[in-house]
Image (cartoon, helix red, strand yellow):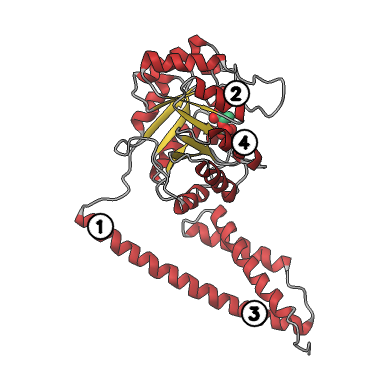
Amino acid sequence: MDIKPIFDKKKRPIIIAGPCSAESEEQVMTAARALAAQNIDLFRSGIWKPRTRPNCFEGVGSVGLGWLRQVKEETGLKVTTEVAKRDHVLEVLKYGIDVLWLGARTTVNPFSVQEVADALQGVDIPVMIKNPINPDLKLWMGAIERIYKAGITRIGVIHRGFSYHGDSNYRNVPRWQIPIELKRHFPDIELICDNSHICGRRDTLEKVAQEALDLNFDGIMTEVHPTPDEAWSDAAQQITPAVFKGLVDNLMVRHASSDDAAFKHSLGHLRGQIDEIDNEILNLLGARMQAADKIGEYKRHNNISILQPVRWNEILEKAVVKGQKQNLSEDFIKVFLKAVHQESINHQGKVMNQKGVVSD
Ligand code: PEP
Ligand code: MN
């Protein structure tokens, strides 16, 4: 695939901002004028809003496209909005919208993605694709492929976090490994962080935006509203243009690489160390699994179940305490050990259920 950039390659970070929803001509124009003064790269605003429950504000519809056209004419800003079906695409093209985006609830549904892709056949317009609501990398990749197959070459992606059932500080948990993995499959695709929908609140927007830039994201998309408390959708996460300016000014832009010889030397040295350590970890894990295989043989011999809950609890608790002394987070220790434990169970299961071995 030969995916082309949407934005100017030389300018980083890419800044996309604007209200969650277009509400009135005045609200859209006030936001756009303030953001044009900050030289943003693209003005966003939802026209059709996918709402979880009916009877919420579902967007102003096509009348708002006229306001976006006015933004273009008056401020010179490029504009983008969400499309989820064929009719949206046709409307958006009539009004000369510059960039389209597919929302999380569209990416999750291959029928909808295909409908949008079919409507885009033969049209040359950039499209940004948000991740699906659930942490399924393949759905995200599938949406990119469907849009690309329709002949669209300028494609970007937006990471807006993933739905999570349970306690969390995020509205949608970032699971950074998923966009990182996506980038491995599509190395040249521009990757934007939608910190607003990840955070769902104002006080963490800057931290998440910085985390994204530290991970080499190309830019951010943030919801900005002239009077956020009065917003008709996503009020809790929207910020004023002035607060947004502060956020952008504070961001530290990281570079993908450096030509500095001393830096390269130290980095090379540390990477060598990391490679060696990773190697050691793998060798140790191999040895751990050999021990698990032996245990499996003893258990088979004595007809004992694989899972020993008391022992497993002990391992986990001890490891959390030891891990903390090594500056390793409890979350990490648990995820890591659970994966190791599962692999041990799989090994033991294989040994215990080997066919053709006489159980002696
Ligand atoms: C939005 O950008 O306003 C929106 C609806 O986002 P998402 O599709 O990420 O929920
Ligand atoms: Mn929103």
Identify the mark nearer the N-term, 2 or 3: 2
Q: Is residue 107 left or right of residue 217?
A: right
Sequence-wise first label, 3 or 4? 4
What crowding class fits label 1: few (fewer than 14 Cα within 10 Å), some (14-19), or many (20 or more)?
Answer: few
> Considering only vertical position in the picture, is 340 above or below 107?
below
> What's the amino acid at mark 3?
Asp
Residue designated by label 2: 48
Q: For the residues labelled 1 and 2, say whether their Cβ atoms are less than 8 Å apart.
A: no
Q: Which residue is mark 1?
A: 264
N-term mark: 1 or 4: 4
Q: Which mark is residue 115?
A: 4
Mark found first going from the N terminus, 3 or 1: 1
Q: Circle 3 sits in a helix, a strand or a loop, which is it?
A: helix
Residue 287: name its quadrant: bottom right
Q: Amino acid at mark 1?
A: Lys
Residue at numbered disc 3 = 293
Residue 65, image x and y in percent? 52, 18
Q: Image quarter for residue 154? A: top left
For disc 2, the neighbor class at 10 Å (few under 14, some 14 to 19, many from 20) is many
Of residues 240 and 40, the one drawn nearer to the viewer in this rendering: 40
Distance between the alpha carbons at the discs numbered 3 and 4: 51 Å
Identity of the residue drawn at 62% across and 61% down: 338
Which of label 1 and label 4 is nearer to you? 4
Q: Work out how far the residue at label 3 is from the one at label 1, CA to CA, in angstroms.
A: 43 Å
